[in-house]
Amino acid sequence: AYLYLIGWYPNLDGDNYFRILGSLKPLKASEEVRYLTGTNSHELKAALPEDFEGDESHEFLMVLASKSPMAFFDSENSTSFHQRLDDLGRGQWRMVQLAYRIVK
Protein backbone atom coordinates (compact mmCIF):
# COMPACT_ATOMS: atom_id res chain seq x y z
CA ALA A 1 0.00 0.00 0.00
CA TYR A 2 1.01 3.59 -0.58
CA LEU A 3 0.21 5.77 2.44
CA TYR A 4 -0.55 9.49 2.45
CA LEU A 5 -1.25 11.77 5.42
CA ILE A 6 -3.65 14.58 4.56
CA GLY A 7 -4.99 17.50 6.60
CA TRP A 8 -8.37 19.21 6.32
CA TYR A 9 -8.94 22.42 8.28
CA PRO A 10 -12.60 23.48 7.83
CA ASN A 11 -12.33 26.49 10.17
CA LEU A 12 -9.29 27.85 8.30
CA ASP A 13 -9.75 26.69 4.67
CA GLY A 14 -12.68 24.32 4.31
CA ASP A 15 -12.48 24.09 0.52
CA ASN A 16 -9.05 22.45 0.35
CA TYR A 17 -7.12 19.40 1.53
CA PHE A 18 -3.41 19.66 2.35
CA ARG A 19 -0.67 17.04 2.00
CA ILE A 20 1.23 16.53 5.24
CA LEU A 21 3.22 13.44 4.26
CA GLY A 22 3.07 11.39 1.09
CA SER A 23 3.89 8.83 0.11
CA LEU A 24 5.32 6.85 2.95
CA LYS A 25 7.39 3.87 1.91
CA PRO A 26 5.16 1.34 0.12
CA LEU A 27 4.58 -1.97 1.87
CA LYS A 28 4.68 -5.37 0.22
CA ALA A 29 2.21 -7.87 1.64
CA SER A 30 3.55 -11.25 2.66
CA GLU A 31 2.40 -14.10 4.82
CA GLU A 32 4.98 -13.22 7.50
CA VAL A 33 4.27 -9.49 7.73
CA ARG A 34 0.75 -8.57 8.75
CA TYR A 35 1.16 -5.08 10.20
CA LEU A 36 3.04 -1.81 9.76
CA THR A 37 5.71 -0.85 12.25
CA GLY A 38 7.32 2.57 12.36
CA THR A 39 10.91 2.80 11.22
CA ASN A 40 11.14 6.61 11.19
CA SER A 41 9.77 8.89 13.85
CA HIS A 42 7.73 11.88 12.78
CA GLU A 43 6.44 14.56 15.09
CA LEU A 44 3.38 16.59 14.15
CA LYS A 45 2.55 19.87 15.85
CA ALA A 46 -0.78 21.62 15.55
CA ALA A 47 -1.17 25.34 16.26
CA LEU A 48 -3.55 28.10 15.32
CA PRO A 49 -2.39 31.01 13.19
CA GLU A 50 -1.72 34.13 15.27
CA ASP A 51 -4.48 36.03 13.45
CA PHE A 52 -7.11 33.29 14.06
CA GLU A 53 -10.15 34.99 15.60
CA GLY A 54 -12.05 32.01 17.07
CA ASP A 55 -11.59 30.21 20.38
CA GLU A 56 -11.11 26.78 18.78
CA SER A 57 -10.58 25.10 15.45
CA HIS A 58 -11.87 21.69 14.37
CA GLU A 59 -9.41 19.81 12.17
CA PHE A 60 -9.02 16.40 10.58
CA LEU A 61 -6.08 14.12 9.84
CA MET A 62 -6.73 11.55 7.14
CA VAL A 63 -4.66 8.52 6.24
CA LEU A 64 -5.20 7.46 2.64
CA ALA A 65 -3.93 4.05 1.52
CA SER A 66 -3.92 3.21 -2.18
CA LYS A 67 -2.88 0.13 -4.12
CA SER A 68 -0.94 2.23 -6.62
CA PRO A 69 1.00 5.48 -6.25
CA MET A 70 -0.96 8.70 -6.65
CA ALA A 71 0.36 12.03 -7.86
CA PHE A 72 -0.07 14.30 -4.89
CA PHE A 73 -0.32 18.00 -4.22
CA ASP A 74 0.57 20.53 -1.56
CA SER A 75 -3.10 21.55 -1.56
CA GLU A 76 -6.08 20.52 -3.65
CA ASN A 77 -9.71 21.58 -3.89
CA SER A 78 -11.99 19.09 -2.11
CA THR A 79 -14.15 18.54 -5.21
CA SER A 80 -11.11 17.72 -7.34
CA PHE A 81 -9.68 15.43 -4.64
CA HIS A 82 -12.89 13.40 -4.31
CA GLN A 83 -13.25 13.20 -8.10
CA ARG A 84 -9.73 11.73 -8.34
CA LEU A 85 -10.64 9.10 -5.74
CA ASP A 86 -13.83 8.27 -7.64
CA ASP A 87 -11.84 7.95 -10.88
CA LEU A 88 -9.36 5.64 -9.16
CA GLY A 89 -12.17 3.31 -8.07
CA ARG A 90 -13.34 2.52 -4.55
CA GLY A 91 -11.64 -0.88 -4.54
CA GLN A 92 -8.25 0.79 -5.05
CA TRP A 93 -8.08 2.91 -1.89
CA ARG A 94 -9.19 3.26 1.74
CA MET A 95 -9.22 6.32 3.97
CA VAL A 96 -9.68 6.84 7.71
CA GLN A 97 -10.16 10.15 9.51
CA LEU A 98 -9.16 11.41 12.93
CA ALA A 99 -11.01 14.49 14.15
CA TYR A 100 -9.46 16.79 16.76
CA ARG A 101 -9.69 20.40 17.85
CA ILE A 102 -7.23 23.06 18.90
CA VAL A 103 -8.33 25.35 21.73
CA LYS A 104 -6.80 28.78 22.46
Image (cartoon, helix red, strand yellow):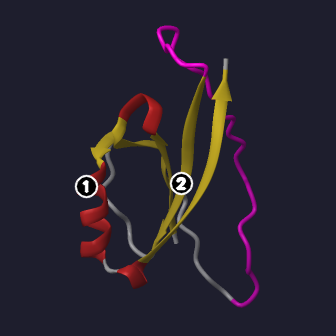
Is residue 7 rendered to the left or right of residue 36? left
Q: What residue appears at the point 56 percent right and 20 percent down from the top-left corner?
A: 48
Q: Residue at x 46, y 32 (%)?
A: 11
What residue sits 53% from the left and 54% below the top? 62
Residue type highlighted by circle 2: Met
Residue 13: in magenta span: no
Q: Secondary structure at mark 1?
A: helix
Residue 13 visible in the displayed image: yes
Q: Position of residue 46 (x, y in %)?
A: 62, 28
Position of residue 99 in the picture relative to residue 87 (left or right): right
Residue behind mark 1: 79
| Residue at image mark 2 | 62
Seen from the viewer's position, the closer of residues 9 and 20 is 9
Q: Is residue 75 above or below residue 49?
A: below
Residue 104: quadrant of the picture: top right
Please give left or right for residue 90 compared with residue 43 in the image.
Answer: left
Q: Are marks 2 and 1 in contact (CB under 8 Å)?
A: no
Which stretch appears magenta? 31-55
Amino acid bearing label 1: Thr
* Image position, residue 66 (x, y; %): 45, 71
Q: Position of residue 71 (x, y in %)?
A: 30, 56
Specify few, some or many for label 1: CA neighbours under 10 Å numbering under 14, 14-19, or 20 or more: few
Kindly give the residue lying farthest to the bottom in the view shown: 31
